[in-house]
Amino acid sequence: MTSAQGSPYWSYYTYDGNGYRVRRSVNNQETWQVYGLGGELLAEYAANASATTPQKEYGYRNGQLLITATVTAGGWGAPPVFDDNPLNPHYFGETTVRAAHITQLRDSINALRGHLGYAPYAWQYSATTIDLISANPIIEMRIALDQALGAPSGGYAPGLAQYQPVMAIHIQELRNRVLAAWGSGSSTQVNWLVADQLGTPRMIFDQSGSLANVSRHDYLPFGEELFAGTGGRTIAQGYSASDGVRFQFTDKERDNETGLDYFGSRYFASTQGRFTSPDPFSIIQMRQSAPNDEKTHSAFMQFIGDPRRWNRFAYAVNSPLVFTDKTGLDIMIIENGPTRPGNGNGLGNPLGHTAIAITGRGVFSMGNGQSETQRDNKHNILGGSVRDYLDRESSRRNTTIIIIKTTPEQDAAIEASLRQQAANKPMLKSDTAIGADNCSTRVNEALDAAGIARAGDPAFPGSAGLRARVDGGLGEVPTVIEIPKDQQQYQMTDLQAIQQFEPRRNSSIPSPGAPGGTPVMTMPMKKKPEDE
């Protein structure tokens, strides 16, 4: 979607080459969006603004949005009110300094400190109507204000030495500093998000952490929000609060101008429970482009026999309380198994081989590349076709596919590690060095870079698959699929997984690492030593 009609203005959206939405123009106000290496939204800026002045920033933990920070500029609202402002100096209708002048100024200084992220100052000196006005409260307020704003360039007015009187200027100059900062200052509103099992933020806390300021969000199964006045929900409980948080159902941006949720590849209408455009996976395209064999025919018949998949606009196979669709696409992960001597396998390989693939980036296999376009001069496959790789290997070995969810940062770390190893390490050979540097150690090193929990000896193929099973990704049980050697039929879900894992180049579909994370596919394989 590149435009939407609103009232009274149109809204316009601009995307980069990876399909990320990088500009949003609403009511003639343009916002630029900046993404991390893995595709997570990091910050929003006004058009042409300096890189040091974001309007909003986002923080994540394990791929889940945790905190937002919004900068509010142009003042902090109504300024503090001071009695007898300005104070008249000596010989000009002199104003008597009173305790109220001290307490009002203290309150305004603490309010200013709060806007700038400082805790209230702990005042040490009493300033009540029965106390004599002394220099101590003035000096204390200078300290409190300087902590927040820094010392004034010209210093403060002199004359607060022992036995010298407190003058109007000593209080007025502090008032002037507070009012000047109030009118031109900016503050940061920090919100902490507490999500449910689907990743939907349900409770929003401000930086105080007070329950009195919490806002709440409840949703129908497909994401339509329930506001105060529905089912006993009240404004006093925090419903219908204007907290400014745009990430809503399953942690996706909800555009106020259209009511649609931005899922990276498609937009989702929560009121309808449907995407506004079809899933780019096409069973017809797959049927036409895939080999005319029993596997393709079986997959096609399985699709025809599963009515839940017929509707390409459907969300999470109509099970929104169980499944989520992180990018608007089907996602999946895979693994493989052994060869024997003879039949073109040479002496066979008792230890096996390990490869890895990332959604949208293809397969990475160290040392056993053959004629692949994505093969380097060291026989490493770097982002090759997953279908071609599996078809080649399934003719001589069993295959196990292990699927786990990862964060965008993990995806980027894995690919960066694999490409760096391919560039910097020597070509793998069947010699005495193979025990220290082989396909398995390289995949395990990439998993180390992503922080995947260790399991087994990384020198032996199969350990990477074990790690995927033990770690489980983002707190989920991994999906495991067994594909026996020479299997003539693929399940429909297998072919969908293969298509989604294919490397995407010059495509409008975002690369992996879209907000919410993408799967990583680890494939421990058994094979002949010479393929190392």
Image (tube, grey):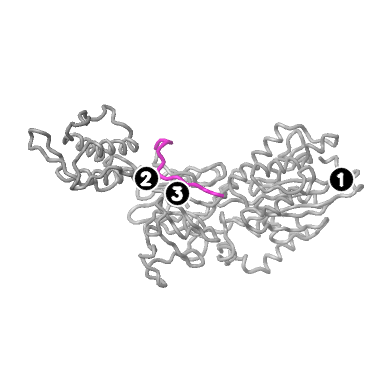
- List the residue tagged with mark 2: 119
Q: Which residues are magenta?
A: 49-61
Q: Amino acid at mark 3?
A: Thr
Q: CA distance from mark 1 to mark 3?
A: 52 Å
Q: Position of residue 265 (x, y in %)?
A: 54, 52
Q: CA distance from mark 1 to mark 2?
A: 65 Å
Circles 1 and 2, Cβ within 8 Å, touching? The answer is no
Residue 68 circle label: 3
| Apparent side of residue 405 relative to residue 11 in the rendered image (left or right) | right
Going from the N terminus, do you reach mark 1 or mark 3 first? 3
Residue situated in front as seen by the camera: 513 or 282: 513
Going from the N terminus, do you reach mark 3 or mark 2 first? 3
**260 versus 173 height, above or below:** below
Circles 3 and 2, Cβ within 8 Å, touching? The answer is no
Q: Is residue 56 magenta?
A: yes
Disc 1 is placed on an element classified as loop
Q: Quadrant of residue 18?
A: top right
Q: Position of residue 4 (x, y in %)?
A: 42, 54
Q: Amino acid at mark 2?
A: Ala
Instruction: Tell me, yes or no, if residue 289 can be seen here.
Output: no
Q: Is residue 176 magenta?
A: no
| Apparent side of residue 501 relative to residue 327 in the rendered image (left or right) | right
The furthest residue to the bottom = 231
Residue 349 circle label: 1
Disc 3 is placed on an element classified as strand
Crowd around label 3: few <14 · some 14–19 · many ≥20 (10 Å): many
